[in-house]
């Protein structure tokens, strides 16, 4: 069955460093991959989408890579700040507009001052 | 342009009662998705609807759960005869037919006593 795995442990990073989160998947060939941020008690907020034919995408301090051979995406936050502390979810989507998106369980990121 | 609206934000029910969760998608969005999230877990897909149609309900329990998205008004997720195991956060997301990105509401936190 389709499976998505994110960093199983919470990630603690010193402010100013680059945080790198991992998303691995099996038994799936997604058309695209998305990253969301979720704060406690709130709904997920969309951050970035990267398609299968794209290797890398950037948005301000965020960078996402997508390796369909390794079946892996890396999510980087450069110059991390305490305000970046949250849970980050990766999600995979299919080719059909009717395809449901499958979410990973998320990685909790804490940025210490 | 208002975001996805969900109400109520918090709902308390006793075992055996019915729970009705409402979701108003973003203006112009005709695709609605419902997810369930347990504490410390990822989002689990439940059902995907378009106006007056259920497209994919593969993630929804066969009994006690139903969903609708009428021509007029919000989408409704209905849980009959609730049990303690139904306690969770229920999120609704909406999407435009031309994009893959889902925009999430703030969620309804259901507590079954």
Image (spheres, rainbow, N blue to C red):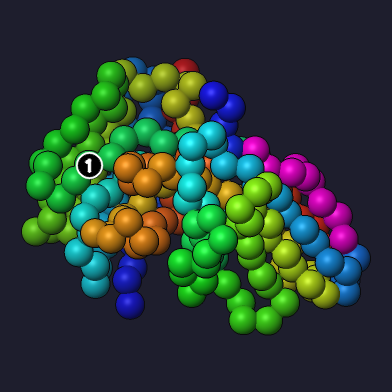
Place of residue B68 in the rendered image (x, y in percent of width and height, measured from the top left): 63, 62
Place of residue B16 in the rendered image (x, y in percent of width and height, measured from the top left): 88, 74
Looking at the image, residue B68 sits to the left or right of residue B51; the answer is right
* Residue highlighted by disc 1: A50
Residue A81 to residue A49: above or below: above
Q: Within the magenta stretch, is there residue B21?
A: no
Place of residue B71 in the rendered image (x, y in percent of width and height, measured from the top left): 61, 53
Q: What stretch is highlighted in magenta?
A: B5-13
Query: How many marks do you count on the picture?
Result: 1
Looking at the image, residue A30 sits to the left or right of residue B105; the answer is left
Q: In front: A22, or A48?
A: A48
- Tell me which residue sits at (22%, 42%) in the image: A50
Mark 1 surroundings within 10 Å by alpha-carbon count, few (fewer than 14), some (14 through 19), many (20 or more): many
Q: In which quarter of the image is residue A42?
A: top right
- The chain holding disc 1 is A
Q: Assign the C terminus of chain B to one quadrant of the image.
A: bottom right
- Tell me which residue sits at (49%, 21%) in the image: A83
* Magenta stretch: helix, strand or loop mostly: strand
Place of residue B28 in the rendered image (x, y in percent of width and height, measured from the top left): 49, 37
- Tell me which residue sits at (88%, 69%) in the image: B17
């Amino acid at each position: 069955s389709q499976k998505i795995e994110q960093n199983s442990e919470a990630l603690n990073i010193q402010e100013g460093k680059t945080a790198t989160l991992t998303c691995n998947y099996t038994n799936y060939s997604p058309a695209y991959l998305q990253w969301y941020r979720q704060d406690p008690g709130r709904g997920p907020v969309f951050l970035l989408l990267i398609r299968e034919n794209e290797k890398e995408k950037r948005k301000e301090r965020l960078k996402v890579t997508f390796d369909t051979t390794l079946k892996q995406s890396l999510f980087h936050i450069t110059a991390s700040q305490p305000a970046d502390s949250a849970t980050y979810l990766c999600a995979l989507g299919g080719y059909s507009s009717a395809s449901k998106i499958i979410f990973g369980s998320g990685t909790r990121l804490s940025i210490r001052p | 342009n208002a975001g996805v609206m969900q109400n109520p934000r918090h709902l308390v029910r006793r075992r055996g009662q019915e729970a009705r969760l409402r979701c108003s998608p973003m203006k112009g969005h005709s695709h609605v998705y419902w997810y369930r999230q347990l504490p410390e877990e990822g989002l689990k897909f439940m059902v995907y609807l378009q106006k007056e149609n259920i497209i994919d309900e593969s993630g929804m329990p066969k009994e006690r759960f139903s969903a609708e998205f009428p021509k007029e008004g919000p989408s409704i997720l209905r849980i009959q005869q609730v049990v303690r195991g139904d306690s969770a956060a229920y999120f609704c997301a909406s999407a435009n037919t031309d994009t893959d990105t889902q925009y999430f509401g703030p969620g309804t936190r259901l507590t079954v006593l």
